[in-house]
């Protein structure tokens, strides 16, 4: 049941979010990137693998806005389609991390005891590996490719979501409405779905946005190393790798794919920061206090 | 003796060491499992076109993969704890020797990177916090947000294009050992260290800024101000000194992150460190080298975090008492 107080909080959350111009602009940029990525195959002016050697290494012109690469392929079309692949990898891998990580974290935090200790030690072990190194190790074992990249990034971000959701669950678990619900014999599954999950959603939304930014960077890094998305499908990381030999004579080959990664990551980071300002209670109190001054 | 055990730092140290030992065992299990999770026969895959039945048998025996898995596990753990990480599938060299050859290059890059990061982040973060809400604060915050969002390998390539290929001030890639040729080492390390350091500086600036802001709102800073101390004394003796304690943690975390994340930067700058070793080992399916490098980096990661926690406990009594 939604109370009037709930509705009020939600409305003021939206108002606070929309009152931050940086968040609004970055959300608009993010929306544009998503729309462009989804429609990439239709709006790309050329085929991503249309080789046109006589027109290789052409600088940006009216016919090729982002110029052409060493094989005469249109850089704009490749950037558009590669952005789509990059977002797809980021979204699916973070979704995997959210589902597995939140399940582990919530169950661990709610049940406590030996199960909690064991699950958290597994999470600690995963945290002992640097993110990119663990992703690289997973790809080294399973072989390169888009599916492996998704799996690798999903695995390395799972412990973060487990920790965030466990910490939030621990603080929500002791709230009176949860204790009362348990006392009157409400089923655990109902308590988890009705009381715990909605109340830990704030930090998870923030973490999701920031993780999407890191997932794009991780995918680009793996593709740069030749272990992520494989040719003939274009990837932003690999386009940057291929540009290395031509960077002084064809700057556009390096600049545009890199700029696409940068803008997408920046937008996710800024939206994440904006969401944190509103959804993280400590930050929120500071903003409200400042507004009243 | 009893006094030593009951000393809060000794107890904290014991607890923290025990925790690290548990995590280390978990790390060893994961690293051991790596080669066994490879779909198919890792030795057959590693040999590729060099496959002959004799070469296959020889490599399988040399790597111990012909033994039962439980025996392999205990033998791996035992050997790893004594510093024996097996032999490379590619050339039969001991993995430990290969890793130790590459370690100095990675450590010098990580240390140079973190040094640059501190040089930028500490003054920038303090400045931003002391000028909160002003234009200079906004500029520093935007710059740090940009730094966090830039792919490091892209920045490395752009730096090479500008400072090496176009202006010709610095070499495009390569490495010179510090002790053999200090000037050459410095010329070669500037661009990779800048690439690593700028990204770390962007993250650390945000931490320094928020740490200074948090301390500035504390009661003792207000007291210091109200008893008539000059703003300079309040800022540097009370605010910044205390704010640098959490900065120590983030410096440690960043150093560990750099050690684990330099793979791509090492590839861009042809830097002969651990990262490039892992990259080449993945391409050659040299599983013992991958396992060894992953283990070494994870252990360094754990060690740095342990040292930071201990330093933190020594500096801030609240941590060890909690």
Image (cartoon, coloured by chain):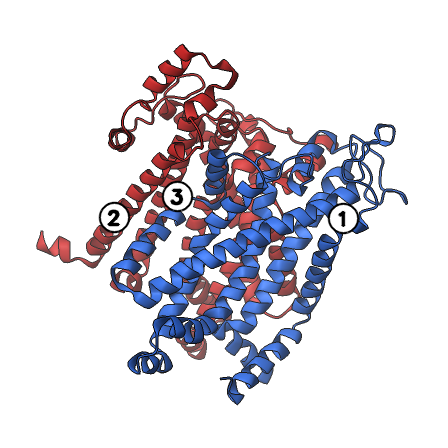
Chain colours: A blue, B red
Relative height, residue A204 to residue A92 (above, below): below
Quarter of image, res B66? top left
Residue of label 2: B17
Residue of label 3: B301
Relative height, residue A104 to residue A134 (above, below): below
Badge 3, how many Cα within 10 Å: few under 14, some, many 20+?
many
Instruction: Report the residue at 80% width, 35% height from top.
Output: A50
Q: Residue furthest right?
A: A62
Image coordinates for residue B232, horizontal then vertical, percent: 50, 66
Quarter of image, res A119? bottom left
Do the residues at pointers 2 and 1 share their chain? Answer: no
Image coordinates for residue B114, horizontal then vertical, percent: 49, 44
Q: Chain of mark 1?
A: A
- Helix, strand or loop at disc 1? helix
**Left or right position of A184 against A35:** left
Instruction: Report the residue at 58% width, 85% height from top.
Output: A292
Do the residues at pointers 1 and 3 share their chain? Answer: no
Q: Chain of mark 3?
A: B
Spatial CA distance of label 3 from label 2 is: 14 Å
- The reply to whether residue B247 is visible in this rendering is no
Relative height, residue B38 to residue A123 (above, below): above
Image coordinates for residue B35, horizontal then vertical, percent: 39, 32
Instruction: Report the residue at 31% width, 78% height from top.
Output: A182
Residue of label 1: A41
Image coordinates for residue A264, horizontal then vertical, percent: 66, 54
């Amino acid at each position: 049941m939604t109370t009037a107080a709930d509705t009020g909080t939600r409305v003021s959350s939206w108002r606070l979010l929309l009152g931050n111009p940086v968040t609004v602009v970055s959300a608009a940029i993010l929306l544009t990137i998503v729309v462009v990525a989804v429609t990439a195959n239709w709006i790309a002016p050329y085929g991503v693998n249309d080789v046109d050697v006589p027109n290789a290494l052409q600088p940006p012109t009216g016919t090729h806005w982002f110029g052409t690469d060493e094989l005469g392929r249109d850089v704009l079309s490749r950037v558009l389609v590669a952005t789509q692949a990059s977002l797809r990898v980021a979204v699916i891998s973070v979704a995997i991390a959210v589902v597995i990580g939140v399940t582990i974290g919530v169950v661990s935090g709610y049940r406590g005891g030996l199960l909690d200790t064991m699950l958290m030690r597994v999470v600690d072990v995963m945290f002992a590996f640097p993110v990119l190194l663990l992703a690289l190790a997973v790809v080294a074992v399973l072989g390169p490719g888009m599916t492996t990249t998704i799996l690798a990034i999903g695995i390395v971000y799972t412990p973060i979501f487990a920790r965030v959701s466990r910490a939030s669950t621990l603080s929500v678990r002791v709230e009176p409405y949860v204790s009362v619900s348990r006392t009157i014999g409400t089923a655990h599954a109902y308590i988890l779905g009705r009381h715990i999950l909605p109340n830990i959603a704030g930090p998870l939304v923030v973490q999701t946005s920031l993780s999407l930014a890191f997932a794009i960077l991780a995918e680009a890094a793996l593709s740069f190393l030749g272990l992520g998305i494989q040719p003939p499908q274009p990837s932003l990381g690999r386009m940057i790798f291929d540009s290395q030999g031509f960077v002084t004579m064809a700057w556009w080959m390096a600049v545009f794919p890199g700029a696409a990664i940068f803008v997408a990551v920046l937008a996710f980071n800024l939206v994440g920061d904006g969401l944190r300002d509103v959804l993280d209670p400590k930050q929120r109190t500071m903003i409200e206090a400042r507004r009243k001054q | 003796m009893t006094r030593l055990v009951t000393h809060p730092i000794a107890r904290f140290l014991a607890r923290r060491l025990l925790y690290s030992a548990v995590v280390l065992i978990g790390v060893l299990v994961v690293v051991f499992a790596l080669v066994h999770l490879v779909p198919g026969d890792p030795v057959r895959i590693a040999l590729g076109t060099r496959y002959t039945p004799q070469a296959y048998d020889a490599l399988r025996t040399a790597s111990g993969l012909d033994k039962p898995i439980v025996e392999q596990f205990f033998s791996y753990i035992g050997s790893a704890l004594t510093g024996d990480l097996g032999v490379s599938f590619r050339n039969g060299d001991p993995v430990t020797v290969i890793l130790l050859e590459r370690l100095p290059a990675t450590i010098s890059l990580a240390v140079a990177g973190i040094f640059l990061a501190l040089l930028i982040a500490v003054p920038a973060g303090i400045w931003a916090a002391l000028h909160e809400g002003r234009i200079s604060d906004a500029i520093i915050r935007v710059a740090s947000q940009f730094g966090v969002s830039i792919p490091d390998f892209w920045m490395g390539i752009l730096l090479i294009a500008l400072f090496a290929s176009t202006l010709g001030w610095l070499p495009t890639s390569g490495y010179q050992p510090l002790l053999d040729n200090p000037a050459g080492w410095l010329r070669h390390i500037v661009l990779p260290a800048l690439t690593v350091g700028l990204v770390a500086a962007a993250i650390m600036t945000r931490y320094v800024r928020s740490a200074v802001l948090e301390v500035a709102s504390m009661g003792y800073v207000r007291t210091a101000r109200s008893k008539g101390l000059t703003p300079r004394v309040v800022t540097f003796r009370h605010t910044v000194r205390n704010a640098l304690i959490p900065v120590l943690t983030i410096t440690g975390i960043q150093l560990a992150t750099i050690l684990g994340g330099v793979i791509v930067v090492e590839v861009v700058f042809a830097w002969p460190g651990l990262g490039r070793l892992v990259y080449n080992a993945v391409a050659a399916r040299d599983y013992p080298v991958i396992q060894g490098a992953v283990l070494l980096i994870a252990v360094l990661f754990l060690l740095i975090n342990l040292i930071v926690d201990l330093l933190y406990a020594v500096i801030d009594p609240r941590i060890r008492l909690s």
